[in-house]
Amino acid sequence: MGVRRDGSVVTAGIPRAPECRVEAWRDIVAVAAGNVHAASNTGRSHTVGLRGDGTVLATGWNQDGQCDVADWTGVTFIAAGWRRTLGVDIDGFVRAVGRRQEGACDVDGWREVVAVAAGDWHSVGLRGDGTATAVGNNWRGQCDVTDWRGLTSIAAGYLSTAAVTADGRVLTTGSGVDEVRGWRDIVAISAGSHHTVGLNAHGRVHAAGDNTYRQCEVDSWEGVVAVATGSAHTLALRADGSVLATGDNTNGQCDVGDFSL
């Protein structure tokens, strides 16, 4: 998914899939894609869009109510996970709709949050003071973030959580993320099902983890201003509005050559 400068949305993937039916969306400032659970490649995904006026749109699989966002207003940040959608409102409160098992939607007590991330079975919130909070399944310690400080960015993957600190270091907890702790000068991070991607201050991209589909082959990328991960693919936005992609392309999700701002 990509947002153009005019607020329209462009997609790559299965053209007729419900989660790709966004042609009529307008005035969009951000999008989030609900991932398919790593162990059950069912194609049951959903897409969420944040409008400039703080309202939210959603399309795709809605068995657990993850697309029930029509009454959301005043939203400033969105995230989509497996069967779940999260939103941060202007007052720092967090909303959640979708699958209630494992406790990943139990965010009612969160306050002063500025960003959220949705893993498969857990949710993470970044507070304005640079601390983090997390709820949900903690089987691999992916929710053990209470002692983190000085954070500027967070990401949640499959049984893992990662965060960037103000001095460019990466903190990790959970499964399969130890390799990224040596990264430096990182300004943004994203987590897929079994790989993690970081963007450094010089526009270069780092990747670690599973490389079965070549989703970590990003060493040659330059001039990047944003990164995103799918279950087994990696995307990057360049400053000129072009998009790079590598990894699993089974459904055409890496066919981004015609994306443009």
Image: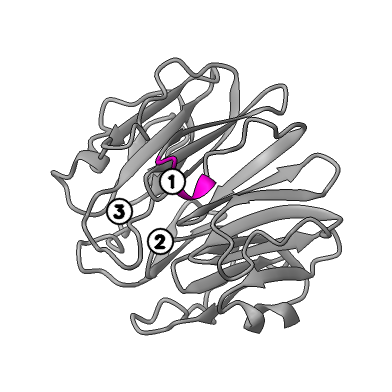
Position of residue 93 relative to residue 169, above or below, is above
Of the pair 63 and 221, the residue shown nearer to us: 63
Q: Do the residues under discs 2 and 3 have CB atoms within 8 angstroms?
A: no
**Quadrant housing residue 43:** bottom left
Residue at the spot of label 3: 258
Residue at the spot of label 2: 230
> 10 Å neighbourhood of mark 1: few (<14), some, or many (≥20)?
few
**Quadrant housing residue 21:** top left
Q: Which mark's residue is nearer the viewer, 2 or 1?
A: 1
Say whether residue 10 is left or right of residue 159. left
> 10 Å neighbourhood of mark 3: few (<14), some, or many (≥20)?
few
* The residue stretch that appears in magenta: 99-103
Spot occupied by residue 70 in the image (x, y as percentages of width and height): 39, 18
Spot occupied by residue 152 in the image (x, y as percentages of width and height): 76, 52
Q: Secondary structure at mark 1?
A: helix
Tell me which residue sits at (13%, 43%) in the image.
16
Amino acid beneath label 2:
Gly
Amino acid beneath label 3:
Asp
Of the pair 254 and 89, the residue shown nearer to us: 89
Q: Which mark's residue is nearer the viewer, 2 or 3?
A: 2
Q: Which of pointers 2 and 1 lies earlier in the amino acid sequence?
A: 1
Q: Secondary structure at mark 3?
A: loop
Residue at the spot of label 1: 101
